[in-house]
Image (tube, rainbow, N blue to C red):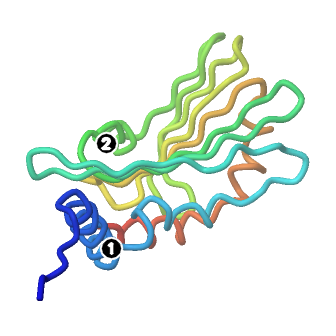
């Protein structure tokens, strides 16, 4: 009696498929940045892109980022969360700054229990609010960029985001 053996190419394909299935079974269902997506609400009167994100690691360092951009009537508003190396940009938030010129307004201080650093380019009618989510030596920041609107117009949009929930979720990311 002769034994029946599948051809080698078929065995190779089956082996690869089995490896993929095993890998898929132990791989998390979602990426860390996807945990931030539910914290980017729809804004009434604004069209929003789908949230985007990425996680990376190099030389033992990890970084995660997630963002969402909103548009309405020639205005743009983007919220971004960053965790990991390279987020030392909030250092300026730990010194109280008040600068006002004809072209720019720069302030830092405390808002909602978090340290912030805020700029507004008056002539371009655009600005940025940087929020330190985890303290002075933070590697976790929340950033709001806006164009085509003043600081006063941007604040109601910024107020629609739950900074504490974002900080908590960011802290829980790997």
The residue identified by callout 1 is: 21
**In-front residue for pair 54/6:** 6
Could you say which quadrant of the image residue 33 lies in? Answer: bottom left
Q: Position of residue 52 (x, y in %)?
A: 54, 47
Point 58% across, 61% down: residue: 37
Point 27% across, 71% down: residue: 23
**In the picture shown, does residue 96 fall above or below 125?**
below
Point 24% across, 63% down: residue: 16
Give the numbered dot on residue 87: 2
Helix, strand or loop at label 1? It is: helix
**In the picture shown, does residue 164 fall above or below 85?**
below
Helix, strand or loop at label 2? It is: loop
**In-front residue for pair 140/40:** 40
Precedes in sequence: disc 1 or disc 2: 1
Could you say which quadrant of the image residue 123 lies in? Answer: top right
**In-front residue for pair 118/88:** 88
Relative to 141, 6 lies left or right: left
Q: Quadrant of the C terminus?
A: bottom left
Relative to 100, 70 lies left or right: right
Q: Position of residue 76 (x, y in %)?
A: 73, 31
Q: Quadrant of the N terminus?
A: bottom left
Q: Are marks 1 and 2 in contact (CB under 8 Å)?
A: no
- Distance between the Cα atoms at labels 1 and 2? 37 Å
């Amino acid at each position: 009696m002769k034994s029946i053996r599948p051809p080698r190419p078929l065995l190779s394909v089956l082996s690869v498929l089995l490896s993929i299935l095993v890998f898929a079974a132990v791989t998390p269902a979602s990426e860390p940045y996807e945990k931030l997506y539910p914290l980017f609400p729809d804004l009434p009167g604004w069209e929003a892109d789908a949230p985007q994100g990425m996680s990376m690691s190099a030389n033992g360092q990890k970084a995660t980022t997630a963002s969402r951009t909103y548009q309405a009537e020639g205005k743009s508003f983007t919220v971004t969360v960053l965790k990991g190396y390279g987020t030392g940009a909030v250092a300026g938030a730990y010194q109280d700054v008040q600068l006002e010129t004809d072209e720019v307004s720069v302030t830092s201080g405390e808002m909602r229990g978090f340290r912030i650093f805020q700029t507004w380019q008056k002539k371009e009618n655009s600005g940025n609010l940087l929020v330190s989510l985890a303290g002075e030596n933070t590697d976790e920041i929340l950033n709001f960029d806006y164009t085509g609107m003043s600081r006063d117009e941007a604040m109601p949009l910024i107020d629609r985001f739950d900074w504490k929930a974002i900080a908590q979720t960011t802290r829980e990311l790997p």
